[in-house]
Image (tube, rainbow, N blue to C red):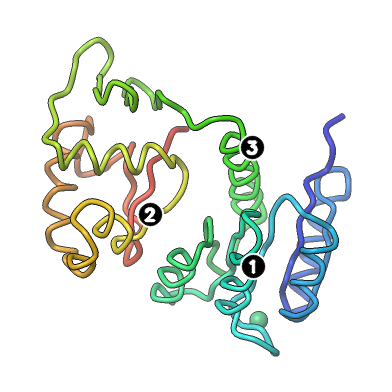
């Protein structure tokens, strides 16, 4: 049987910690609980978990500061728990090194899917980065810098390709507008979200069977984009 996933939960609301523990048993997840940022950081260092769930609203410290502190010494996947509608918090958390976020109230099924995906990505990253990303009929060859729909090659502009390659190279992860703009156009373009939207629209025209309902590159409203492989 597979080992349980070891998760440190840094969350001051006891009902949420109980909800997790009651919903997902110890065979699947070993929950390691902390009610404050300070305790959480100590447990991450001591217990070396597979994933950290981090509430952004903690009593003793700002969750973002906890995240920045963790990122100074560990690459452990961090999924932040945010309140509904706080898009700016999600963006700040992703830019500070969070791997993903879940909005409260969340479903356990959704949370566990995110946790498993984070564990998988962390595992793949330690082996070697993928050179080919396949999603349905779409194949992005990152080594050859070519994109195929089935047997047919799709011609992309250099900017469209760069956009797709960044997202596909970190499939399953949300990349923020700011991150994409900085990587493709440079730091002075960090706020040029309109430019990004224009290129995303033309990329979708070429790769998506239905650009109005994208299946490969999902919009994360107010935050960024996520490439979906499943
Ligand atoms: Ca809280």
Q: Earlier in the sequence, mark 1 or mark 3?
A: 1
Residue under numbered circle 3: 123
Per the image, label 1 sits on a secondary structure element best described as: helix
Label 2 or label 1, whichever lies nearer to me, is 1
Q: CA distance from mark 2 to mark 3?
A: 19 Å
Label 3 residue SS: helix
Q: Which numbered marker is on residue 70?
A: 1
Furthest-bottom residue in this view:
60
Say which residue appears at 76% left-offset and 62% top-offset.
8
In percent of width and height, residue 118 lies at 60, 46
Residue 39, placed above or below residue 218:
below
In the image, what residue occupies the spot 43% across and 66% down? 95
Q: Quadrant of residue 126?
A: top right
- Quadrant occupied by the N terminus: top right
Q: Residue at x 79, y 55 (%)?
A: 48
Question: Which one is earlier in the sequence, the residue at label 2 or at label 1?
Answer: 1
| Vertical placement of residue 60 versus 159, above or below | below
Q: In the rendered view, does 185 fall on the left or right side of 174?
A: left
Q: Which residue is mark 2?
A: 175
Q: In the drawing, does residue 76 fall left or right of residue 189?
A: right
Image location of residue 4, percent across then percent down: 83, 43
Q: Secondary structure at mark 2?
A: strand
């Amino acid at each position: 049987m597979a080992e349980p996933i070891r998760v440190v939960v840094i969350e001051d609301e006891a009902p949420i910690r109980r909800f997790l523990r009651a919903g997902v048993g110890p065979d699947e997840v070993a929950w390691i609980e902390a009610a404050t940022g300070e305790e959480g950081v100590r447990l991450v260092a001591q217990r070396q978990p597979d994933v950290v769930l981090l509430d952004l609203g903690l009593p003793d410290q700002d969750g973002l500061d906890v995240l920045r502190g963790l990122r100074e010494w560990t690459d452990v996947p961090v999924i932040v728990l945010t309140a509904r509608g706080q898009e700016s918090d999600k963006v700040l958390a992703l830019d500070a090194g969070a791997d993903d976020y879940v909005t409260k109230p969340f479903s356990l099924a959704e949370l566990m899917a995110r946790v498993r995906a984070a564990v998988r990505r962390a595992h793949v990253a330690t082996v070697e980065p993928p050179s080919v990303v396949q999603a349905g009929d779409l194949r992005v060859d990152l080594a050859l810098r070519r994109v195929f729909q089935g047997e047919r090659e799709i011609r992309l502009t250099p900017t469209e390709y760069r956009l797709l390659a960044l997202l596909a190279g970190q499939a399953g992860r949300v990349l923020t507008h700011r991150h994409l703009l900085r990587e493709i156009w440079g730091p002075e373009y960090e706020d040029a979200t309109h430019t990004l939207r224009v290129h995303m629209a033309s990329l979708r025209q070429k790769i998506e069977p239905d650009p109005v309902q994208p299946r490969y590159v999902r919009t994360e409203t107010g935050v960024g984009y996520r490439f979906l492989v499943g």
